[in-house]
Structures are given as structure tokens and as C-alpha cells.
Image (cartoon, rainbow, N blue to C red):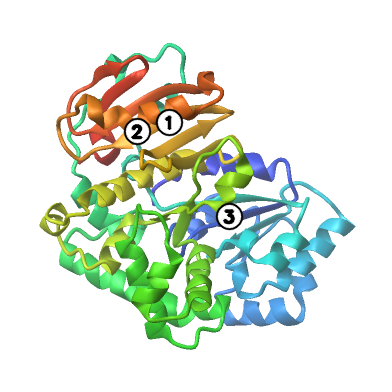
Amino acid sequence: MRARWHVRNLDAALRVLPVTVVTGARQTGKTTLVKSLGPARAYFTLDDIGVLDQAERHPDALLSNRPVTLDEVQRTPALLLAVKRAVDERRRAGDFLLTGSANLLLMARVADSLAGRAIYLELPPFCPAEWYGRKNALLPLDRLFAPDFDFREWPVEVGDWPAWLLRGGFPPALAIMADSDRAIWFAAYVQTYLERDLRQLSTVSSLPDFQRVMALAAHRTGRLLNQAAVARDAALTHPTTHRYLNLLETGCLVTRIHPFATNPNIALVKSPKLLWTDCGLAASLAGIKNSQDVLHRPDSGFWLEQTLYQTLQTWRAMDPLDRKIHFWRDRPGHEVDFILEQKGKLVALEIKSGSTVTDSDAAGIRAFRDSLKNKSSLVRSVVLYAGQSRPIDTDIFALPWGWMVAVR
């Protein structure tokens, strides 16, 4: 068993609120995480048919022994109403720990029933540094916000992003060394999701249609989400495609990164960028079978972006209240791949696959900087690439991404 960094978030949440909800895609390690807290908590999983039946018929009895952990609660959303009653009768921090392979915040009835009673924690798949158990491995990202940042301290390591793209971050897949064997695992994962998890979330009339939308979404990773184009290519209606993409997001398989804007209303109406929570699953759906496949693709830069996002989403999840991830794009076409936000301060990240950086590679960053009304909010800008650390301009640095996909 590999320790998860997120156990510290879990411990803190249990000390404060009566309900803590841990969400994430199936196989991210939610059950292992909650069981690591020890035997003091009663544990029940709704994957057990008997427990599921009790949760539907006599949920109050299931909640009588506190503190209690309930695993896979998305299988019976009505159970959350019983949790609400129990909390309202006796409110005590840490009594209820729930996990779900669906984003319960996107399930309206659940979100309404636990408002003011629960904190929601996201458990993303492993990033490379967490899988290898490196302490303080995300410190370089934190240091980007520091006033005394020194580019010479940035870690320089050999990285193999195509290998990590294929491995992803699900523990069972990470334990499989052969690409061909791992492809079988991902195929089985998709089949299980379609035939089991998806049916728990919603009725889907045609599983082949849904799987086609999954593949089309994988081919569009790292790009602006154009639902009309997905609907056209899938030969489906726009409302059906919209619902299928929403189900993928509810199932914690994809995420939409919204554009940064000083006016939040503007950001909400602009097209988001689509990314998968697990790069290995996305690569499998896109038919990428080995490292050479992705390196020879004309869209390999987007796949590098998807791979590095595996680390960025872990950074965000470690402090979900104060950290956000955006992207930026203006009408003339200037863009910045990621905007990291922490307590109102911003760091711009542009990602390049090559080993050289020219002044033009920072054009999007400069356009973003010029667009800001409060220019002091942008504390630093970075072009991540395959070369060595060096300054490009005032508070713009070229830094290597190798440590984010280190070979060990």
C-alpha cells in the first residue's frame, strides 16, 4: 500500500465538520485511503448487496454506530437524507466519512441535502511524485509564488512524459509494467464503467454511442470544448452529447478548466478546456498504444499538457479552498496553457515539448500580463520545456518539466 498525501486533508476535515465526502473516479484509492484511518471507525461499503439493501430500507440503523465510514454512497443517493437527519439530531465533527465514485456536488439532490454539513475532498489519481513517495515533491510549484524565487533552485531531472502518459495514475494500472498488458486493464476499466458505474448515474439508451463520445473527448484533451463539434462527429443530438459529457464529469473522469477572467461572469460563459483526470485512460481511449505513437502525433503537445496536468491537479487538490487552475485565451488567439491561482496570486504556465525556447514562446504570457488590470497579481510566469533553467524576461523563466514526469 502506498500512502496518499491527501490523508492530511482528510484528518483536518474530520476534526471540523460532521460529514466529510471523498470523491474521485473508481480505482483512485478512496477505499484504501479511508481504511488507513484505522479500526476505530465502523466501515460499510454499498458494493456489498446486503449493505446496499439495508441502506435503501433501513438507513438509520446503518448510521447508528458513530463514527462510521460509508463507501460508494453514489449507489444510493437517498442515504444522504438519512445522514442529514442524523447530523441535525446530533452534530459532532468526524461522525460520517463518505466516499463516492461520482462528484456528489454535481448531483443536485445530494448537494442540497448536505449543504452546510459537509466538506468535499477530491482524490485524483496518483501523480508521478506521489507514486514514488517523494516528500515535499510539489514544493517547486509552491516556490513559484514566493517573492524570493530563485530559478537556479528549480529541480533538474530526467523525465519521460510519454511513459507516464501511458501509465496514468490509477494504482492497478501503475503496477503493470507492459504497455500491452496495461491496455487490457484500461479496456476492462472502460467496460466496467459503462456496464456498472454509468448505469448508477443515469439511464443511457446506447452504450456504443456513449463510448464513442468518450473516445472523441479523449482525442480533444487539452483543447477548448466545442460540444457542437463533438455532437456532429458522434452523429448525436447536441442535448444528448451535452448530457453524456456531463455524466463523464459527474463520474470524475473528465474536468473542465474554465478560462481566467477578472469578471467571473465572463469566464462562465466562455468555452472551457477539456482535460481527463487520468492521462492513461485518455490515451487508451484515443488508441495510443506506445510512446512512439504519441511522439509522432501532430497533437503531441496537447498530450504533454494532459500528462503534466496529472501533477497540477494533485497540487490543486492538496489545498482545494485556496488553489484553482484556469487557462487564458484572447480573441486574437494568444493563450496561456495554465494559470495557477493561490490566494489571489497568479502564476502563468506555458508548456512546450521541445528543448529550446525562444522569445516568441512567451508571447501569450506577455499578452496575458498586459490584459490584467491588477498586474501585481501575476507574481511569476514560466515556460515549461525540456531544456535548462534560465530567465527569459522580467519574472518570466524557462524551466524544465522533467521532475514532473521523473523516471524514478
Lower position in the chain sequence, tag 2 or tag 3: 3
Give the side of residue 231 with respect to residue 184, left or right. Answer: right
Judge by depth and name the residue closer to the eye, 6 or 337: 337
Callout 3, which amino acid? Val
Disc 3 versus disc 1: distance between alpha carbons? 35 Å
- The kind of secondary structure element at disc 1 is helix
Other residues around mark 1 within 10 Å, as few (<14) / some (14–19) / many (≥20): many
Q: Residue at x 54, y 56 (%)?
A: 35
Give the side of residue 48 with respect to residue 151, left or right. Answer: right
Q: Position of residue 16 (x, y in %)?
A: 73, 41
Disc 1 versus disc 2: distance between alpha carbons? 6 Å
Q: Which residue is mark 2?
A: 364
Q: Are marks 1 and 2 in contact (CB under 8 Å)?
A: yes
Q: Which residue is mark 3?
A: 22
Disc 2 versus disc 3: distance between alpha carbons? 36 Å
Q: Residue at x 33, y 39 (%)?
A: 129
Q: Residue at x 75, y 50 (%)?
A: 18
Q: Which residue is mark 1?
A: 368
